[in-house]
Every structure is written in structure tokens, then in C-alpha cells.
Amino acid sequence: MRSDSVIIIPTYNEKENIERMIHTLMQLEHGFDVLIVDDASPDGTAAIVKGLMNTYLGRVYIIERSGKLGLGTAYITGFKWALKKGYDYIFEMDADFSHNPDDVPLLYSACADQGFDLSIGSRYVSGVNVVNWPMGRVLMSYFASKYVRFITRIPVYDTTAGFNCYRRKVLETMDLDAIRFKGYAFQIEMKFTAHMCGFKIKEVPVIFVNRVLGTSKMSGGIFSEALFGVIKMKVGSWFRKYPKINN
């Protein structure tokens, strides 16, 4: 019987991490499926995943895209696929082990057992739980989240977190095609939209560990998008009617 949950992992040049990540996720007790959305990685990431699809038949899937099209569009593509396949719990997760696979069941439990609609693997809900990041990057990320919280007034400490679990009704209620941000500010817009739709959000404390293998895709422009785009998003929300929760 197929799992009720799928973990969506966007990839671009993650050959050093993706095999170990998939093996690790496959060992989790609940039995989570995995969807890789690969943006034409030139390093052979997709070929590694296809080999593992034979090992974990019916549990590992891949969508191959034509190029590097952005984090937000990768997740939107994955969300639409997951909804079509009938999954009840849909995760976002990085491939590089900055998100600990052992925390996946905690996010699942927050939604499946505790009744929340969106659970967030939060670096900042209980202090600053970040390991091996340069101090400048920690401060930039931390204060960016505080800034977003101040502007948007959403009750979330880690607004840029990329480790999340959605109930399917959240993604069904949202107009996914109306999500505008393409980079890491996509994560802010998704949380803001879920809040504006009236969904219940839970932050689960996690420890974020900087990648050991592979190359980070973060840049100063990513934070600029979050800092300046969030004001436009907030102002736009004054003139936008958000969908009602579909019970």
C-alpha cells in the first residue's frame, strides 16, 4: 500500500548527497515516499535517482526539468504532482542533510496526530539552532526572519524555513499559480498565504546543520528578494481576497 506522505526534494548537482539521503529516508519507520525534482543537473544526480527507483520500486520518483528554473517552481511542480497522486501529507526538504531526516516524523506527527495544517522545522523558535554557518550568515538569516515576521505579522519565527509539512487541504485551498516568488522568498510567501487562509501552523524545533558535501545555492540575492519583496507582498495582501479553508 502506498504511503500517505511524500517528501519533495528539489535537486541541482547533488550527486554527493542524494543517494545517502534517499537510503536514509527509506529507512524511516512510517514509510515516506520521495519525489525528486531535478533541474537538469549536469553532475548525474538524475541518473543516481533513477537507479534507486529500481531499488525502492513505487516509493522513489523523479521529475526531470529542462533547466535551472528556480526553487519555487520546483516545489509547485512537485505539489501539483503530489496532489494528483492523492498524498495527504506533503513535505519540503533539502537534499544536503542540512535538514535531519530523523526530524521528518516530528513534522508528520504535528500534522497527522496534533491536528496542525502546516508544520515547520524551525531554526529559531527555541533560540538559534544553526550549526557550522558563518556568523554573518546566521545573523543575516535570523534578522531576515525577524524582519519578515514584523512586516507580515504572521506568528512564525522561522519564516524562510525550507523544511515543512503541509496537509493536502492547504495546497488544495491555495492558488498555487498565484505564488510569485521563485527563490527562497517562496518559503515566506507560502507561509504567509497559509496564514492568510486561516490554517493552523506549528513550529517544531530542529537543528539546522550546514552542508558538508556539495555546493550551496544560497546567495546575497536570495536574501534581497526576501527583504524587499516581502513589503510588496504585504501591501498586495490588502487588496487580495484569500481562499477560504475548504473543510
Image (spheres, rainbow, N blue to C red):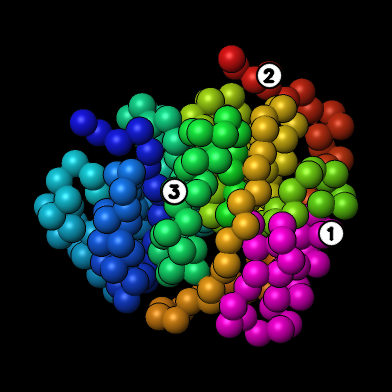
Q: Residue at x 44, y 48 (%)?
A: 105
The magenta segment: 122-148
The image shows residue 236 at horizontal and vertical percentages of 82, 37
- The residue that label 3 is drawn on is 105
Query: Mark 2 against mark 3, which lies toward the viewer?
Result: 3
Q: Does 203 appear above or below 128?
A: above
Q: Residue at x 65, y 49 (%)?
A: 203
Q: Earlier in the sequence, mark 2 or mark 3?
A: 3
Q: How crowded is the residue under tag 2: few (<14 C-alpha within 10 Å), some, or many (20+)?
A: few
Q: Residue at x 72, y 27 (%)?
A: 198
Q: Earlier in the sequence, mark 1 or mark 2?
A: 1
Distance from Cα at disc 1 to Cα at disc 2: 27 Å
Q: Earlier in the sequence, mark 1 or mark 3?
A: 3
The image shows residue 26 at horizontal and vertical percentages of 27, 54
Q: Nearer the viewer, residue 237 or 190?
A: 190
- The residue that label 2 is drawn on is 244
Find the residue positioned furthest to the left. 54
Q: How crowded is the residue under tag 1: few (<14 C-alpha within 10 Å), some, or many (20+)?
A: some
The image shows residue 82 at horizontal and vertical percentages of 38, 35
Q: Nearer the viewer, residue 13 or 7?
A: 7
Q: In the image, 202: left or right of 97?
A: right
Q: Does 168 appear above or below 100?
A: above
Q: Does 93 appear in magenta?
A: no
Q: In the image, 155: left or right of 176?
A: right
Residue type beneath disc 2: Lys
- The residue that label 1 is drawn on is 147
The answer to whether marks 1 and 3 mark residues whose Cβ atoms lie closer than 8 Å is no
Indicate which disc residue 209 carries: none
Q: Quadrant of residue 222?
A: bottom right
Residue type beneath disc 3: Pro
Distance from Cα at disc 1 to Cα at disc 3: 30 Å
